Image (cartoon, coloured by chain):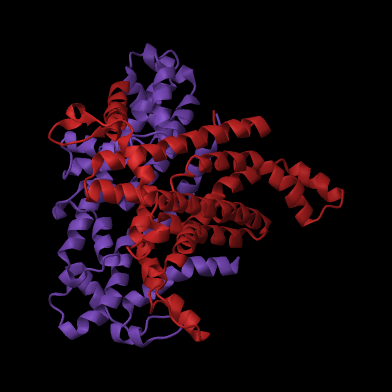
Chain colours: A red, B purple
Amino acid sequence: MLLPVILYYVIFMYLPMYGLQIAFKDFSPAKGIWGSAWVGFGHFTSFYESYYFWRLIRNTVLISVYELIFGFPAPILLALLLNEIRVRLFKNVVQSITYLPHFISVVVVSGMMIDFLSSDGIVNQLTGLFGIPSESFLIMPEWFRSIYVASGIWQGVGWGSIIYLAAIAGIDPSLYEVAKSDGAGRFRQIWHITIPGIMPTIMIMLILRFGTLMAGGSMEKILLLYNSTTYETADVISTFVYRRGLLQMDYGFSAAIGLFNNVLNFILLVSANKFSRKINNTSLW
Amino acid sequence: MLVLVVITLYPFLYVLFASFSNPADLIQHRSLLLAPTGFSLESYKLVFENPMISIGYVNTLIYVLAGTALNLAMTSFAAYALSRKGVKFVGPVMFGIVFTMFFSGGLIPTYLNMKNLGLLDSRWAMILPSAISTWNLLVMRTSFAGIPVALEESARIDGANDFRILFRIFIPVSLPIMAVMTLFYGVGHWNSYMDALIYLRNRDLYPLQLVLQEILITNSTDSMMSTVADVDKGLIQETIKYATIIVATVPILLLYPFLQRYFVKGVMLGSIKE
């Protein structure tokens, strides 16, 4: 019964890893992966020396860091707020509505963003009411990251909060009783009981996040939202690999960039895990 | 909280209202849209008449049904085999599987691999590469591991083989988790976009999401409007986008109230630590 499973992993996961050797080769489709000539680290050095290198690194890191700073705490805050709602019905309604965007496809979300942020979209109609001149946000490089991160929060905050709500539900209620009798108010209870109570969950989620720090967000959404006027701030390693590799069919070079990216991610994940195990004994493995 | 609800909900309402609006009125309209401006079903008519939308719908249904069936079979096979005690090589196999969560060949080698396998531009390209989600496999394995060994042993004494045990005992006693997996995989296939973008060139195989991309992102609605007079094109283009969004998301939006508690259960299952 394990056989089809092992075959699946070998064919669709490990064969591509084997194919990664094209990162070190001057790949020609005619000669195949095996027959192409080795170029050693040639692709890596030409990437490092290229004009794109620092721009891609900067964009990749910045998008991830913004997501980490703004996107990561958002579901935790929402979970803490939801937990304070005492009216069950209201709480359920809020939860149902905030989970909803999670199920909408990235194409639809991007389509909505493009429409709302266009020069005659609703965002401009609203700001127009206050006399602010209209702007085409999606062709302005300085807006790209905010749009990307904000739409991510819009889509994911409710869904992301579920795991923290589950963690909050697991906290021993008697702790709150004790705190109350010691005269702790709502904020002190959150600060001294709820937050420490969900800390292990926060740490695990944070470690997982670190593993994607060099992924530079969701490639799908960036591909859908960016355009040549916003490459300056929007182009990340994965989208560059897509354009260079699949659209211009420069396989060896883009495979090398992809490998560089993957290795960095892997190193980050392993170090984050190690660090977390050291400081508070939580780790993925 | 209320602000949050409004921010989350309003974009959907806007799209809904705009889709029913009269295009000429919508363009004139300034300030918040709180109800359709005018009423027109013209854009829905054009969306339903568009052959690409119906092709996309049929293809997406095929991918969702076939893909989810394969997902469930493969994931439960894997979860069953890896959760039983005394199976050989579980350790190394698990390592090999979990490793793929953290490291992969990347876009280009994966694409070339599909090309070598001759799967480009075939329906298989939408189904096979995503046959198992490792995350879901881990969740299902944890759940199967909690099933008492006694159940399995008594069935074995009665002469049942592994397939019988899986289908007659394990799956029936884990129906809630099977439901959750069906939903996760199903929604995944419904919304799947990247695989289609990379592997499919033949428009007859396009799933709905790729058709949507053409309409919403690259704005190529012309094919839909061959019957519309040129002067009206710019106008109706406004509302066609909204009608398309509604048509493409309605299945999930309609099912959502019924499915929501299962989804939430799924996240909870995922958060259980071994």
Task: Quadrant for residue A136, please give it.
Answer: bottom left
Image location (x, y in percent) of residue A24: 29, 32
Q: Is residue A79 above or below residue A197?
A: below
* Observer able to see residue A192: yes
Image location (x, y in percent) of residue A284: 55, 32
Quadrant assignment for the C terminus of chain B: top right
The residue under the point 24% across, 47% down is A246
Q: Is residue A206 above or below residue B149?
A: below
Q: Is residue A17 above or below residue B127?
A: above
The residue under the point 25% across, 32% down is A25
Quadrant assignment for the N terminus of chain B: bottom right
The residue under the point 58% across, 30% down is A274
Q: How many marks?
A: 0
Residue at the far right in the pictured view: A182
Relative to A55, B108 lies left or right? left
User: Considering depth in this image, is B12 or A121 the residue closer to the camera?
Assistant: A121
Relative to B198, A167 lies left or right? right
* Observer able to see residue A158: no
User: Considering depth in this image, is A27 or A85 the residue closer to the camera?
Assistant: A27
Task: Quadrant for residue B164, please give it.
Answer: top left
User: Considering depth in this image, is B164 or A252 the residue closer to the camera?
Assistant: A252
Image location (x, y in percent) of residue A23: 30, 35
Relative to A202, A111 lies left or right? left
User: Considering depth in this image, is A183 or B180 the residue closer to the camera?
Assistant: A183
Image location (x, y in percent) of residue B8: 49, 65
